[in-house]
Image (tube, grey):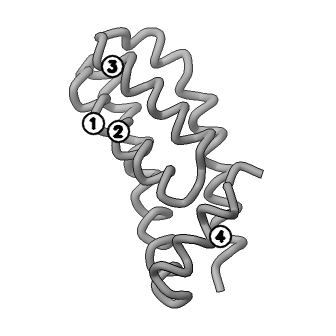
Amino acid sequence: MELDMRVYEELKQATGADFIDELVDTYLDDAPRLMQELKSSLEAQDAETFRRAAHSLKSNSATFGANGLSGMARELEMLARDNKLPEAAARLPAVEEALHVVEAELKGLRA
């Protein structure tokens, strides 16, 4: 399990059971777009766009308690900041795999 259920439940309590589904839907819409942005910015060798996409994925994932994925995205963000895109590219498949696990877990939690 990728999600820290304590963080997820705290978010659910703070936002309400109805709104959490909207937040999950937004994440499920945004995360694949961010992954595509990571890939296209790598192809373009655009470290700044890559860094911003990694930052967004990091923050959005942490919101739901996807701490492993958030940490991986943080590493991508730091690599891009240091203009180490080849190292970031090597880590991207593992990030994408972790994202798929998080997406499946979040879909399973929807009311």
Q: What residue type is labelled 3?
A: Ala
Give the farthest residue toward the bottom.
18
Cβ atoms under marks 2 and 1 closer than 8 Å: yes
For residue 39, which quarter of the picture? top left
Q: Is residue 81 left or right of residue 63?
A: left
Tell me what residue is drawn at x 65 percent, y 86 percent: 111
Q: What element carries label 2?
A: helix
The amino acid marked with disc number 4 is Lys
Q: Where is residue 79 in the image (x, y as percent from the top left)?
A: 39, 16
Which circle, 2 or 4, is nearer the viewer? Answer: 2
Mark 4 crowdedness (10 Å alpha carbons): few <14, some 14-19, many ≥20: some
SS at badge 3: helix
Marks 1 and 4: CB-CB under 8 Å? no
Amino acid tagged 2:
His
Left or right position of 13 against 26: right
Give the spatial CA distance, label 2 vs label 1: 5 Å
Q: Name the residue under label 3.
A: 80
Gap in angstroms between the C-alphas marked 3 and 1: 9 Å
Question: CA separation, marks 1 and 4?
Answer: 25 Å
Q: Which amino acid does label 1 sit on?
A: Arg
Residue occupied by mark 4: 107
Separation of disc 4 and disc 3 at Cα? 30 Å
- State how far apart marks 3 and 2 are (Cα): 10 Å
* Residue beneath disc 2: 55
Mark 3 and mark 2 lie on one chain; the one further toward the N terminus is 2
Q: Between disc 2 and disc 4, whose residue precedes? A: 2
Report which residue position mark 1 lands on: 52
Mark before the other along the chain sequence, 1 or 4:
1
Q: In this view, does 20 lie above or below 37?
A: below
